[in-house]
Amino acid sequence: MHGHFLQLCVIQAVASFIHLEPKNATVLRGSEVHFNCSTDESWDVMTWLLGGRTFLTISVEHGPLGRDESVSTVNHSMSSLSVWELVLMNASFSPTVQEVTCELLPTKLGRSSSALFVQEKGNVRILESDQSVQEGMFVIFHCQASGWYPDPSVSWVVNGTTVDRSDCNTSSLQDPSGLFNSTSVLQMKAETSTTVECWASVSAARAHQSSSVELTVVAPKTPQDYTVVIAVIVSVCTIILLAVLILILCYRKKVTKSISENKVSPSLWTVNLSSRRRSVADETRGKVNLGYHAEDVKSSGHHDLRSRADGTINIISPPRVPDIIIFRSQNQKEEDLSTLYYKGGKTVRRVTTV
């Protein structure tokens, strides 16, 4: 191990005559990147390599050889120091670190290298839209950052304050192309209306990518609101029930009254019948008796008896059978009154012989 450390020191001492700055460069894909190669040694050809592949050659006498649209050079050399600046116009993305090398010929071991990190800036969005929730409820937001390299830094900002990472759950997955897709979940309690933002960034980006939604918090419904609604419903139902009961009672009273008027009791029928009998007897006074049939007495032996009887009849009014007045109610069947009908009547005579 000590031998290896000693070898590195020797290489650095030999290469100290050639300086390539910066030693580490981190840029976004498509950005410009600048490197400066300087030396106080004499050289004939300066060669630039990217990832082990030569892409630019500079002659000390003729300058850059060839023409490449993706690079440009600037000569900053002085009398005692040779300085050339290399500008990569459009840094290409690679999921690995790229090595940039400045090599001088014919100087032995005349080279110096730097590390180039090209990052990719993807996009970010919150999957949920603007929401309106009641105060005190828990709300969950999902943020998706896709197409980043390296693994992006995802953070949440609520009302201008960065949320602690322990309150978020973030996971990442690298696809076959080397890009990272990250998902972050935030669960928070709704207290006040605010703006919820999700930020994603990489070190080379000057600004973060962000997505935001509006969270509107409304006051919860108080129990009094439900109490008032329930009271109103109960009152309306009670009024309807009372109205129905009143209608039912009125209907039953009307039906009962109608039945009472149509129904005739036996006692009332008897009283009415007796009253009719008395009234007929009073009106006829015995003068008209439809039930009387005269007897034909032709025997001469009974002539005197008949004369006497006639005289007696004029003195003693025989009892007469009154007419039968049939009174029938609506509910009384005709068959029930047939026994009351008497077709004829005879005058009852009493004869006293002296």
Image: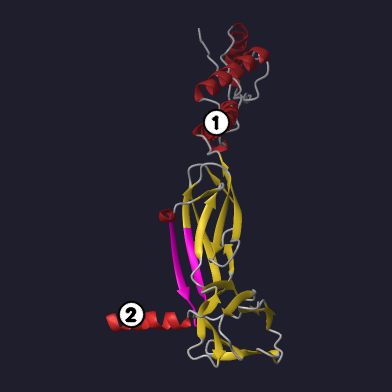
- The answer to whether one can see residue 117 in this image is no
Please tell me which of labels 2 and 1 falls first in the chain. 2
- The answer to whether one can see residue 242 in this image is yes
The residue positioned farthest toward the left in the image shown = 1
Residue 220's disc is: none
Kind of residue at badge 2: Phe
Of 344 and 269, nearer the camera is 269
Q: Is residue 176 magenta?
A: yes
Residue 345: x %, y % from top left: 58, 25
- Mark 2 element type: helix
Kind of residue at badge 1: Val
Q: Which residue is mark 2?
A: 5
Q: Is residue 178 magenta?
A: yes
Of 116 and 275, nearer the camera is 116
Location of residue 243 (image quadrant)? top right
Q: Which residues are magenta?
A: 168-185
Residue 348: x %, y % from top left: 55, 19
Residue 100: x %, y % from top left: 54, 82
Q: Which residue is mark 1?
A: 228
Q: How is the image coloured?
A: secondary structure
Q: Is most of the magenta stretch helix, strand or loop? A: strand
